Image: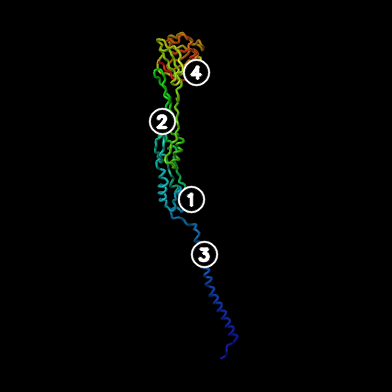
Amino acid sequence: MRPPDLAASVEAYGNASRERRWLSSTARSAPIRHRHLILISSIGASILSGIPSATAQPPPDTIAEGVSIGGLDVSGLTRDEARRVVLRELVAPKREAIPVAFRGRFLHLEPVAAGYVAKVDYALKGALNFGRSRPAQTIDVPLKERIRADRIRRILRWYNARFATTPVEATVRFDDGRPRVTPARAGVEIDLASGVRRVARAVLVRDQRRYRLPVVRVQPETRRIGFSVVVDRDGFALRLFKGERLMRTMTVAVGMPGHRTPDGRFEVTRLDRNPVWYPPDSRWAEGLGPVEPGRGNPLGTRWMGISSPAIGIHGTPQPETLGTAASHGCVRLSITNAEWLFNLVEPGTPVKII
C-alpha cells in the first residue's frame, strides 16, 4: 500500500482545523447576538408602554378624568349620572327659599319665582368635550347661572305694598280755638335698586343664613306745621300760632250783620302786596270803581286771600273800625299788623274762624 502523501495530508488537516474553529466560533457568538436583540426589544417595549396613547379616549358618554363642574368632581360619570349629581349638589340648594328680613319680619323669597336658572346641560356638554375634541387635562367647567332682575323687583314691590309703612303727614286740628299738631312720621320701604342686587347675590352666593333687605325712609310732603291763624269773631281777635305755641294776638274787625264773616276751617290761598281793590259784584259796591294801591286803598297794603270765596285778611285805612263788626265779611287788621302777618304766612297756612 502506497503511503499517503504527507503534504496533502498536512493541507487537509489544516483545512479541517480551520473549519472546526469557524464553526465553533459561529456557534458561540450566535446566542449572544440573539440575547442582545431580545434585550433591546424589551427596553423599547418598556419605554413605549410609559407614553400615553394620543388616541386614548374615555368611554362613550363618560366624562374624562380630572374634569369638574362648578368645583364638583364629575370625572368618570356618565352624562346622566353627572346631571343628577350637579342638580342635587349645586342646583337644588340654590332653589331653596331665601329668608329675607324687612322691618323685623322674616319673609321667604323663592329663587325660581325670581327667575333662577342653571345651565346644566351646557356645562355637561363642555365637560364631555375634554379628553375628546380637547386634550385631557384637569379642568373646572363653570356652571352658568342666571337670575332675572325684573322678577326680583316685582317681588320686592309686592313686599312693599303689604309691609312697607307709608309716611304720615304733619297735621293740625283745632280744639277750642287752639291748634293741636300731629307730627309727621317718615315711611319705610325697601330700597329697590339695592334690594335687587342683594337678593341676586343671596341666590347665587348663599354666604349668609338670612339677608336683611335694604330700606329707605320716605319723607312726607308736609313735614311740619308752621304758623296757623285763629280768628275769634266774638272776641274781635286774630291769634297767630307757631305749632301749638301762641305767638301774637291782634285786634281785628269782622263782618257786620248781613255780611257775617264765615266760620270754619280754611287756608291761605293768595298773597298780594299793594293790591288793587276791585269792587265785588254786590249791591253795596255799585258805582264804586277800582282803587289803586296805597294806604287809602280799602285793602290797605297787604291782601291774604283764604279759601272762602271773596274773603280775606287785609289791612284797613280805617283803624277806628277795629274791634267792631264793620266789614263786608273780611277780617281787617291795622296796616302795620297786616304787613307783619303777611311776611309770616304762606299759601297753605291753616286759618280757623270760630
In the rendered image, which residue does mark 2 sit on? 165
- How many numbered discs sit on the rendered protein? 4
Identify the image quadrant of residue 179. top left
Instruction: Depth check: give the residue in front, 33 or 196.
Output: 196
Give the distance between the C-alpha atoms of the residues marked 4 and 3, in whole angstroms: 111 Å
Say which amino acid is labelled 3.
Ile
Q: Position of residue 215 (x, y in %)?
A: 44, 34
Q: Nearer the viewer, mark 4 or mark 3?
A: 4
Instruction: Depth check: give the residue in front, 342 or 235.
Output: 235
Q: Are marks 1 and 3 in contact (CB under 8 Å)?
A: no
Give the residue displayed 39% in from the left and 35% down from the top. 105
Instruction: Give the secondary structure at mark 2.
Output: loop
Instruction: Give the secondary structure at mark 3.
Output: helix
Instruction: Depth check: give the residue in front, 127 or 87.
Output: 87
Q: Nearer the viewer, mark 4 or mark 1?
A: 4
* Coloration mode: rainbow
In the rendered image, which residue does mark 3 sit on? 43
Give the distance between the C-alpha atoms of the residues marked 2 and 1, in whole angstroms: 51 Å
Say which amino acid is labelled 2.
Thr
Q: Position of residue 213 (x, y in %)?
A: 43, 36
Q: Which mark is residue 343?
A: 4
Say which amino acid is labelled 1.
Ile
In the rendered image, which residue does mark 1 sit on? 139
Q: Are marks 4 and 1 in contact (CB under 8 Å)?
A: no
User: Local crowd at mark 3 within 10 Å, few (<14), some, or many (≥20)?
Assistant: few
Give the distance between the C-alpha atoms of the residues marked 3 and 2, in whole angstroms: 85 Å
